[in-house]
Amino acid sequence: MLQYFTMSADGQLATGQPQDQTYWINIERPTTTEINQLVQKFNFPKDYLTAVLDDAEISRTEQLNQQTTDNAALIVMQFPKLTTSDLGYLEYQVYPFALILTPKVVLTVSNYPASFIQDFVMDPESSRLSLDNHENFVLAIMWYISHAYVTALKVINHKTTVLERHLTRATRNEEIFRIMAYQKSLIRFKAALTQNAPVLAAVEHSATHFNGSGHQALTTDIIIENKQAADMTNTTNQILQQYSQLVSSVISNNLNDVMKVLTSLTLILTIPTIIGGIYGMNVTLPGASFAHAFSWIAFGTIILCVISIEYLRNHDYF
């Protein structure tokens, strides 16, 4: 799927077919036909587009230090995407995202929809960014990619906080499976952020690109955002590791409490069962000939049950 964006008369991003002005093409899950058409039209290597079709593609740059800016340059970064695991729990995957700079057009390519692209389009400050300055435009998208990790980590922290509120009643393994999904997400985040760091360093030290006014400040902001995400990932991962052990212990204790209560109830309910079984025998028993024998037996059974409950409660068995 190809989406074309140009600049409207009031300087806002707008969808539509381009004319002679510079423009931006957002490409999601490109087909073979679309890939061939774009390669022929803009004259850049085919692997610039096909790279994102491989979910295991690593972050990298190409042609950032070329002698001229006439050729297309490639930046590949990893971005997070919320998915559902095979067990049905929410977790994050990371996928490659390509940015291609050509003299007249910026191309962004991904194999999966990226939520930050919609944020980028809808954000008023970003939508005022002119497509005439491709490098500013690309740096803004790169910042959104790095910020997407921070947003995802905040979601994980919020989900963990919600999980804590239900922990006192947890007796199943669902909480552990959720934490496992979050931990898998953090492992992917750590690997992706580690891959993105050299790309940002290459952008910062490029001899021919991103050397304009304000580019250094924008690049620094992106690097700081990436470091912040990396630090948050490490901290959250350590917390979840400790939390995973705590959850296992709490679930075990909760199950022990449940078993303790059920065992106590079983013991108490055994008393009337035994007494009823004895006096239900077809033999002569003490007190069987009394006029109110049933009432006295029932009253005595209740007294024994109450005494048993108090005894178990005083010894923290109930």
Image (tube, grey):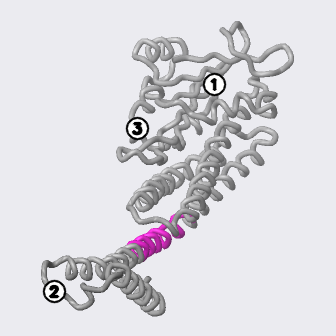
Q: Residues within 10 Å of mark 2 (few under 14, many from 20)?
A: few
Toward the left, the furthest residue is 283
Q: Position of residue 131 (x, y in %)?
A: 74, 24
Residue type highlighted by circle 3: Asp
Decide which of 264, 66 is in the foreground and name it.
264
Tell me if 238 is positioned left or right of 231 in this view. Answer: left
Kindly report which numbered mark, 3 or 1, lies closer to the viewer in this rendering.
3
Q: How far apart, in angstroms, are the residues tagged by discs 1 and 2?
A: 100 Å
Q: Is residue 242 magenta?
A: yes
Q: Position of residue 36 (x, y in %)?
A: 44, 14
Decide which of 8, 38 is in the foreground and name it.
8
> Which residue has dot 1 on it?
106
Q: What residue do we see at 69% from left, 38% from top? A: 139
Does residue 219 lie above or below 120 as drawn? Answer: below
Decide which of 1, 61 is in the foreground and name it.
1
Q: Position of residue 145 (x, y in %)?
A: 61, 42
Q: What kind of secondary structure does the magenta stretch mostly adopt?
A: helix
Residue type highlighted by circle 2: Thr
> Which residue has dot 2 on it?
284
> Which residue has dot 3 on it?
55
The secondary structure type at the circle numbered 2 is: loop
Q: What residue do we see at 33% from left, 82% from top? A: 291
Tell me if 158 is positioned left or right of 255 in this view. Answer: right
Residue 158: quadrant of the picture: bottom right
The secondary structure type at the circle numbered 3 is: loop
**What span is colored magenta in the figure?**
236-255
